[in-house]
């Protein structure tokens, strides 16, 4: 039996599962980022934290976790490592001591100039143009919204 027939007649064929394609794509894309982020000592999750801060600084830990669709307990170890690298500083809010605010350090702000080269580098590494990536982003955003509504 050919692969095409198997996939068409078997609703449980691994190759036809959206969840499998998403899982492999996520691992593959994150792996493609690794050599681009290594020179500045960042992992992909840490890079996402930095992106959020470059756009929205300062951020509370809770707000940062919300933006990244993560739990605060997951974000805290990322922040500790970024603080050890000298990219961010954590401090209690002056208006509410229960709130921890995250701010970029001067070194963290300077890192943005390197980060601005990353999207073009990744387009080249992935062999995709801006239009393809916009279409993919649009489709993924729709999928995320659909899954959130469940």
Image (cartoon, rainbow, N blue to C red):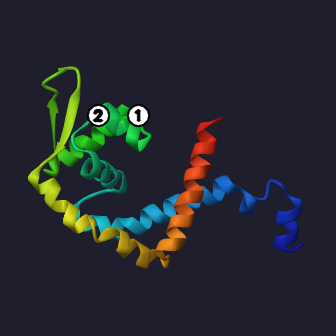
Is residue 71 positioned above or below 86 on the image? Answer: above
Count of numbered circles on the image: 2
Asked if disc 1 and disc 2 are in contact, CB closer than 8 Å, the reply is: no
Task: Give the left or right position of residue 71, taking residue 140 as reference.
Answer: left
- Residue 127 lies left or right of residue 98; in this view the side is right
Question: Which labelled disc corresponds to residue 43?
Answer: none
Looking at the image, which residue is at 61% across and 50% down?
A: 143
Query: Which label sits in the foreground, 1 or 2?
Result: 2
- Residue annotated with mark 2: 61
Q: CA distance from mark 1 to mark 2?
A: 10 Å
Q: Quadrant of the C terminus?
A: top right
Determine crowd level at label 1: few under 14, some 14-19, many 20+ residues with C-alpha closer than 10 A.
Answer: few
Q: Helix or strand or loop: what does disc 1 sit on?
A: loop
Q: Quadrant of residue 62?
A: top left
Q: Residue at horizontal 50%, vertical 68%? A: 133
Residue linked to disc 1: 71
Mark 2 residue element: helix
Q: Give the percent coordinates (x, y) of residue 70.
A: 42, 38
Sequence-earlier tag: 1 or 2: 2
């Amino acid at each position: 039996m050919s692969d095409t027939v198997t996939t068409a007649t078997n609703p449980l064929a691994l190759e036809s599962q959206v969840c499998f394609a998403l899982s492999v794509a996520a691992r593959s894309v994150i792996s493609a980022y690794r050599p681009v982020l290594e020179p500045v000592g960042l992992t992909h999750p840490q890079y996402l934290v930095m992106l959020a801060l470059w756009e929205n600084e300062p951020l509370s830990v809770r707000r940062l976790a919300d933006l990244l669709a993560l739990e605060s307990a997951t974000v805290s170890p990322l922040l500790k490592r970024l603080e050890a690298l000298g990219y961010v500083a954590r401090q209690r809010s002056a208006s509410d001591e229960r709130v921890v605010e995250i701010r970029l350090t001067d070194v963290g702000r300077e890192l943005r100039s390197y980060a601005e080269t990353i999207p073009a580098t990744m387009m080249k590494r992935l062999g995709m143009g801006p239009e393809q990536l916009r279409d993919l982003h649009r489709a993924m955003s729709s999928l995320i919204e659909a899954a959130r509504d469940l």
